[in-house]
Amino acid sequence: VKGLWSNPYSIFSTNVTDIYTYISVGTDSTPPSTTDYALKNKLAEKLAESVSADLNNRIVTIQATLSFTSAVSIYEIGLEIDAVDQNGVATRILLDRTVISSGIAIQAGQALRVTYRISM
């Protein structure tokens, strides 16, 4: 994980008091790389509406629905977290950046529901 914060290990610290999970979307179709620390052209983000865990099957599901007022093609989808320390300082970390080569065409007034299912 690469980022632009002063202490990249702060998320693993006992000083972390809150973690917020976001799903973000963007319009850049550049293939993902190991040096990505953010979406290339973020268009929108939404705080996850649901985060659930299936402990028996070791699967975490994270979902959010993003609404759009104008037509757009989505090429990149990201899973990000903000880890907030006891001083209220947030560290944004990109956990995943997926690029959909053909894109997803969204019309004005439509919504896109994004679901991450992570097996552990």
Image (spheres, helix red, strand yellow):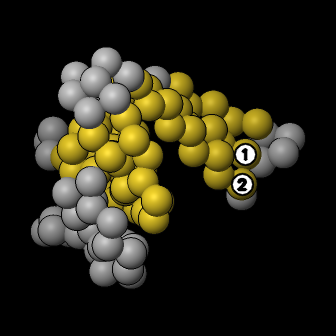
Residue, far top: 109
Residue occupying image coordinates x 16% and y 65%: 5
Residue pointed to by mark 1: 59
* x then y, percent, for residue 20: 35, 37
Q: Residues within 10 Å of mark 2 (few under 14, many from 20)?
A: few
Please state which of residues 43 and 23 is positioned toward the viewer in this rendering.
Answer: 43
Q: Is residue 112 left or right of residue 117?
A: left
70 over 94 or under it: above or below: above
Residue pointed to by mark 2: 119
Report how far apart the C-alphas of labels 1 and 2 lie in the structure. 4 Å
Q: Secondary structure at mark 2?
A: strand
Residue occupying image coordinates x 65% and y 46%: 117
* x then y, percent, for residue 8: 26, 69
Residue occupying image coordinates x 71% and y 58%: 120
Name the image quarter holding residue 43.
Answer: top left
Name the image quarter holding residue 19.
Answer: top left
Residue occupying image coordinates x 76% and y 36%: 54
Residue 58 appears in the rendering: yes
17 over 92 or under it: above or below: above
Q: Secondary structure at mark 1?
A: strand
Please state which of residues 5 and 49 is positioned toward the viewer in this rendering.
Answer: 49
Residue 78 appears in the rendering: no
The numbered disc on residue 37 is none
Amino acid type of disc 1?
Ile
